[in-house]
Image (spheres, rainbow, N blue to C red):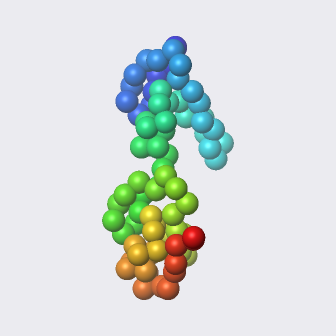
Amino acid sequence: MAVCETCGNDYEMAFEIRAQGVTHTFDSFECAMHTMAPRCEHCGVMIVGHGHQVDGRFFCCAHCASASQGASTVDHA
């Protein structure tokens, strides 16, 4: 069995995600998201969708990107 790096659960159905040359082990997608998903630089929400990237900074939506950067950006429809 493998131990989840987020919660420490030793689980027989754990899985690995490889990102940027590093292998991570998790017992659920929830734990994987908590560890690996970026956070909005304006409101702090976990970004699990497309989000917005402005000048290398990550935001959950156009509103947060505009509020933080003052840049004009729109959500994709």
Residue 27 x %, y %: 47, 27
Vertical comparison of 73 with 1: above or below: below
Residue 3, position in %: x, y? 46, 22
Q: Residue at x 62, y 44 (%)?
A: 19
Q: Is residue 57 above or below residue 29?
A: below
Front-most of residues 37 and 77: 77
Foreground residue among 61 and 14: 61
Q: Position of residue 10 (x, y in %)?
A: 43, 18
The outermost residue toward the right is 21
Q: At 52% across and 78% down in the image, what residue appears?
A: 74
The quadrant in which residue 4 appears is: top left
Q: Nearer the viewer, residue 42 or 21?
A: 42
Residue 14 visible in rendering: yes
| Residue 56 appears anywhere in the view | no
Task: Name the image quarter holding the C terminus.
Answer: bottom right
Task: List the single residue furthest toward the left.
Answer: 43
42 relative to 26, above or below: below
**Which residue shows up at 64% across the image and 47% down it?**
20
Q: How many numbered discs, if any?
A: 0
Residue sitting at x 39%, y 25%: 8
Q: Give above or below for 7 relative to 35.
A: above
Q: Foreground residue, 66 or 26?
A: 66
Question: Where in the figure is residue 43, as x and y percent of width and height?
Answer: 33, 65
